[in-house]
Amino acid sequence: MAQITVAGLSTVYPNGVRAVDGLDLTVADGEFFALLGPSGCGKTTLLRTIAGLEQATSGSVAIGPRDVTMVEPGKRNVAMVFQDYALFPHMTVQENIAYPMRVRKQPKATQKEVAERTAQSLSLGALLERRPGQLSGGQQQRVALARAVAIDADVLLLDEPLSNLDARLRLEARTFLKRLQRELGVTTVFVTHDQAEALALADRIAVMESGRIRQLGSPREVFSRPTDTFVANFIGSTPMNLLDGVIEGGHVLVAGARLPSPLDLEDGTKVVVGVRPEYLAMEEGVGITGTVSIVENLGVGSLVTVECPDGTLVGATVREQHEPAVGASVTFVPERGRLLLYSKETGAILG
Ligand code: ATP
């Protein structure tokens, strides 16, 4: 087991793309850590640089007390699972799982014993003689995981390991992965562009953009208090409302409404008001009033979008028994403490 310490790390590709840009990060021993962000933000490059598959241009990577910046991948004691699983098609499940042990020249008997035991724990016991082509996506994913964990690595690196699975299997595999990580207690870095997955699995999340970390925190912190509008936009299965507002006499004027300001700001300050659809209640009171324009079914409840007199669109989630009709006039009242104010200029959270 080991902590991962990344300091001042930059990884620049030969074509000049600075995929990781002066990044600092500490992943605690035994932690399940998610790297989240839009396509091209540098998640995979960071993971590959930790693994040693990409060379750092500057800065350092340490695993436990050991600086591994110049250490070749095979000597870092890191296991990695790729998006496409990278299984050997001509080898059986057993041979695939045993392969890294074979490379490490472990005794044949140990290879067999560990491969069988790992396969059992991942419900692959009956499939040891099959080849990858004879397995479902979920089974292939478990073989890739088994191969990674069988070598007892200090660190497990997962690059979108669930992305090839269909929606139902993906949920199952998620639960499975979480349990496995808990049992092994292995320090794990998990790359995903799926925010729901990161929120569900991780102890902590780093949201990346352009090779840097925009916010790092627990899933709850990142969800309920995004520190800038980029993160606010990215996190949440229904997007956060981000509405132009202006401060006046201890209030914020937004979408034709006058709401108590959560912060004491100077009159005339232009802000972006952030409030999640989940934190707006459709009820009588001081809130944002508009005409219902769209009602979208979310499974449990609906997302109701209203158009305010000034043309602003605001969304709120409601339970199905409260679903209003299109064209109705309704008021959304923010839950106490749920209104966030961002700088109109920089997008950074205020207060
Ligand atoms: P995705 O979610 O799409 O996999 P990502 O966040 O993992 O994206 P990276 O794959 O790390 O992002 O890519 C970061 C940046 O580096 C992108 O601009 C990408 O085009 C660039 N890049 C990635 N690999 C290479 C490479 N081998 N050579 C040059 N540029 C690369």
Image (cartoon, rainbow, N blue to C red):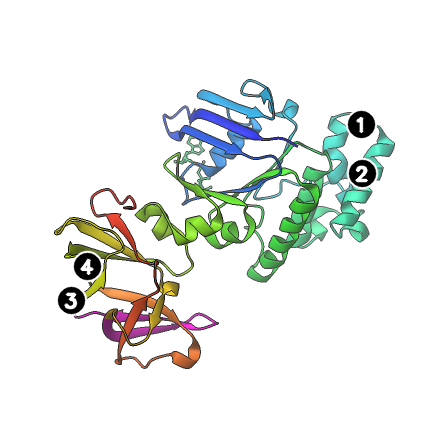
Residue picked out by circle 4: 251
The secondary structure that dominates the magenta segment is strand
Label 1 and label 4: CA atoms lie apart by 69 Å
**Disc 1 element:** loop
Label 1 and label 3: CA atoms lie apart by 71 Å
Front residue (pair 35, 110): 35
Left of 29 or right of it: where is 90? right
Residue picked out by circle 3: 310
Q: Which residues are magenta?
A: 289-309
Image spot of residue 143 (x, y percent): 70, 45
Image spot of residue 153 (x, y percent): 68, 32
Q: Nearer the viewer, mark 2 or mark 3?
A: 3
Which amino acid, mark 3? Answer: Asp
- Of pointers 1 and 3, the one earlier in the residue sequence: 1
Which quadrant of the view contains residue 241?
bottom left
- Check contact, mark 2 vs mark 3: CB within 8 A: no
Task: Categorize mark 1 by other alpha carbons within 10 Å: few (<14), some (14-19), many (20+).
Answer: few
- Of pointers 4 and 2, the one earlier in the residue sequence: 2
Image spot of residue 256 (x, y percent): 17, 66
Ligand 1's image quarter is: top left
**Residue 106 marker:** 1
Residue at the limit of the structure toward the top, as seen here: 70
Q: Specify the quadrant that holds the N terminus.
A: top right
